[in-house]
Image (cartoon, helix red, strand yellow):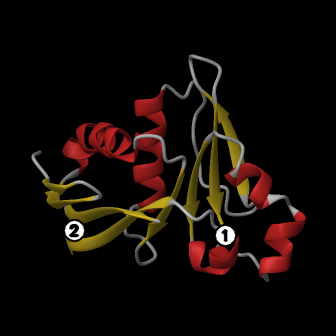
Amino acid sequence: MHPDVNVRSAVFPHVSLADLEKVAGELIGLMGHVRVCILTGEMGSGKTTLVKALGNTLGVDDTMSSPTFSLVNEYHTHSDNKIYHFDLYRLKSEREAFDIGVEEYFYSGNFCFVEWPEKVSALLPDTYAEIKIEVVDSAHRKIEFLIHG
């Protein structure tokens, strides 16, 4: 996959499941020192599947799953770093996110991947990455990457 790259953005127009690990590696490279990444896309577009591929790229030892009921899952990598995966779909309010310490996670220096980020938009750091996933067809997704801030 060769994305159309600019300094702070990239587009992967036709990604299949077989391409996902390679694209995940490129996305991690594009993030540079940015550690908070929001994922947007309709329900079922593949946000959790992409987070699993990003985790594999970063060396997660554990089996990754959606934190739908716990809101956040913590994973450890081979190099003993932590990765946080948030699924905020069931979040009732921004206050609830504040109460679970979402800002502490965001400023921990560890990778944070956030699904349904619109529920915590005021709590995001000034600089963060965004991955937009759009369904092209049943087997392909368009993935857009950009850095905000």
Find residue 63 and report its horizontal and vertical position in percent.
Answer: 58, 34
Circle 1: residue type? Leu
Circle 2: residue type? Ser
> Which disc number belongs to residue 138?
2
Kindly state the secondary structure of the residue where label 2 is placed: loop
Residue 18, placed above or below residue 10: above
Q: Nearer the viewer, mark 2 or mark 1?
A: 1
- Work out whether residue 127 or residue 49 is closer to the camera in this orientation and state it: 127
Sort mark 2 into few (<14), some (14-19) or many (20+) by Cα contacts within 10 Å. few
Determine which quarter of the picture holds residue 140: bottom left
Q: Is residue 35 left or right of residue 92?
A: left
Q: Is residue 33 left or right of residue 22?
A: right
Residue 52, placed above or below residue 99: above
Find residue 37 and report its horizontal and vertical position in percent.
Answer: 50, 56
Q: Which residue: 24% across, 37% down?
A: 22
- Work out whether residue 97 or residue 5 is closer to the camera in this orientation and state it: 5
Q: Is residue 70 visible?
A: no
In the rendered image, the quadrant that contains the N terminus is top left
Which residue bears the numbered disc 1? 88
Q: Is residue 63 left or right of residue 3?
A: right
Find residue 97 and report its horizontal and vertical position in percent.
Answer: 79, 69
Find residue 123 and report its horizontal and vertical position in percent.
Answer: 70, 70
Q: Which residue: 85% across, 78% down?
A: 95
Q: Which residue: 43% across, 41% down?
A: 54
Determine which quarter of the picture holds residue 26: top left
Residue 137, placed above or below residue 128: below
Name the N-terminal-most of marks 2 and 1.
Answer: 1
Q: Is residue 107 left or right of residue 143?
A: right
Residue found at the very far right of the displayed protein: 99
